[in-house]
Image (spheres, grey):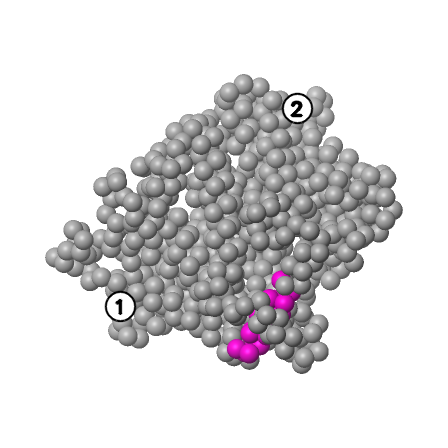
Amino acid sequence: MNALKDVLQLLVTPGVWHATLQAGALLLLPALGGVISERSGVVNIAMEGMMLTGAFFAVVIDLAAHNVLLAVLGAMVAGGLMALIHAVVSIRYRADQIVSGVAINIFAAGVTVFLLNRFYGLSDVGQVPARDALPNVTVPLLSDVPFLGKIFFSQNIMVYVAVVLLIAIQVLLFRTRLGLRIRAVGEHPQAADTAGINVYLLRYGAVASSGLLSGLAGAFLAIGVSNTFVPGMTDGRGYIALAAMIFGKWTPVGALVACLIFGFGQAVYDANSSIRISQYLLSMTPYLLTLIVLAAVVRRSSPPAADGIPYVPGAE
Amino acid sequence: MAAAAKRSARRGPPPTVFRRAGRALGIPLGSVGLAFLAGAVIVTVTGGNPILAYQALICGGFGLVCFGGEQPALQISNTIVFLTPLIMAGIAVALPFRAGMFNIGAEGQLIMGAIAATTVGIHLGGWPAFALLPLVLIAGSLAGAAWGGIVGLLKAVTGAHEVVTTIMLNFVAQWFLRFLIIGGPLQLPHGNSRSSPISHSAVLPTLLPHDNSVIVFGLPASVYRAHTGLIVALAAAAFFAFLLWRTSLGYEIRAVGQSQRAARYGGISVRRTLVVTMLIAGAFAGLAGAVQIAGVDHNLTDQYFTDTTGFDAIAVALLGLNSAVGIILAATLFGALHGGGSVMQSDAGVSGNLVYMLQALILFSIAANFLRSVQLRLPGVGRTPLTPEADAAAAALAQEVDQSAAADDKGIA
């Protein structure tokens, strides 16, 4: 009973909803990347690794250059380069895309700590000064609205960026010619090829974008949410983003809904001090929820038809 | 078949055991070689000495070429400790591969096995070893089987993709573990984030006597941690081979993996096979967790939260070509890499995390079959000729080899 009261108490605290939005945006960026990649027909379970790489380089560049913009760009490039490995291996060499994704994640975990040891010695972890971190943006007037103001209009700049990207990608995929082409390549590459669409180019582009977005999320995590790099700091967020993408039936808006649910779980976990249920049991709930949803709705949610199948020109 | 036999007779003597072994080992060994080459480039570019690094890695892994005062026998013992769970977890990934499924959930299944083994090992602590020890291993297997079975069931009933469900179940298992040992029912009364140790009669004995007065290779025997779990692992590998090649279930698993449609027309229940496969796979991973608890750790710690055995097992299964012998060899390699990583870090000053990069590079190399493209591109390196006619002939030859291999498989089954 007490535990239930604690949960209800949490629901009326603006801080929890503020944290939900932040955690949700952090998940949304790689989830959007996953949507683009898989819509083009390349399975991507490597958001975790690309995000981790982005987080590492965001801190490294910020420490070296004291420039947030440069750090964010560097993180995106680093994530994009990891994605390019995945793209080359799975598009050019037609490798199993799940194996390649697993390899990227292992590689990222290794290379970040390897370079960390190279740059800063065996135990040091880069600590970014707060003034270099991604700033919070407080919208004048609107942020003074009681309850809602603090939740929606006093967020980290990345939360707003994520919202803009969400809208942009939803429009791109479903309202533009390029989006139609990306989806065509993911559904029926043979037909798309016959119609004169460059299947490989679009797939390379889509996978690279997933890396840019995941790298951006890594920067948000490392120099926005926290201000340091800790080995393995993504902590499964890339995998949750993957689940959110599937949960949201491979659409940006669907992924947003799932990310907010997972973000809420994260926020409750972070607010653990005021709750008397084990925070670890609470942490299980998003994953259990995903399982239940998968079991219940999976028949109505199916991936793009050519998702995970390498394209061989001329083969049917 | 007769034509194929005639043709191979015309080309000379039939492939000997050695030639067949060479053909089977070619791609894995080449992939490992390629990965180490790439690793050497990475070490060189980042200002390290690759020869020094690999020498320390081999010393730490296999106890060979040690110049830093390491005790070779101790290094080998450590490698055995690392490779033991990798064999069983590798089987847990390989068996579903044979049925056309991707088990990324070996880690979660292993954790559940470790949890069950610890629980039994603590709560039935008064039982004698001859009863308790098997019970601990069985409990671990059953818990792993249950965790894997959920995946199979979801796949069979709702079609939920096993990659996603196993990832989710990994997280559930990890957080369940943390719940149990941090403030939960398994936590030590005054300790932090660990369970109480299992009973002495639940402990798998070490390979050498646990006795400080016995000196082995200049060190007291009790420092060697290699334990009889290795025998359990090797038995598991033998059972895996038997199951796959000598039982009708094994035949069904392979048939489903080759073509679900053909298997269905052949009268095999695909759904049942998928569920049973995941049950057995989970049992192997759960056994790995139980052996880890009973053999090395003796209690649940937060270490299992960050354990990566179940993910390393994916590389083991792929490198071992999903065969029992291959898995043992691949597990030995990865066990040696993990054992050698720390020596490389202390002796050569190269971060031990190079080991993970090597592992990923091996995965890339196998998955993408870079070797084949290298072969095709460099005349003289590969045996594949470059003219179109010869190319077609080579393709026909490859097909023939595949067919005769498939025929061999059928003969054994």
Q: Is residue B304 visible?
A: no
Kind of residue sitting beneath label 2:
Thr
Q: Which residues are magenta?
A: B398-413
Chain under disc 1 = B
Q: Is residue A164 visible?
A: yes
Horizontal and vertical percent for residue B367? 58, 52
The residue carrying mark 1 is: B201
Look at the magenta stretch and give its main secondary structure: helix
The answer to whether B21 is drawn above or below residue A195 in the figure is below
Kind of residue sitting beneath label 1:
Ser
Q: Is residue B404 magenta?
A: yes
The residue carrying mark 2 is: A138
The residues tagged by marks 2 and 1 sit, at their Cα atoms, a distance apart of 63 Å
Quadrant location of the C terminus of chain B? bottom right
Q: Quadrant location of residue B99?
A: bottom right
Q: Is residue A150 magenta?
A: no
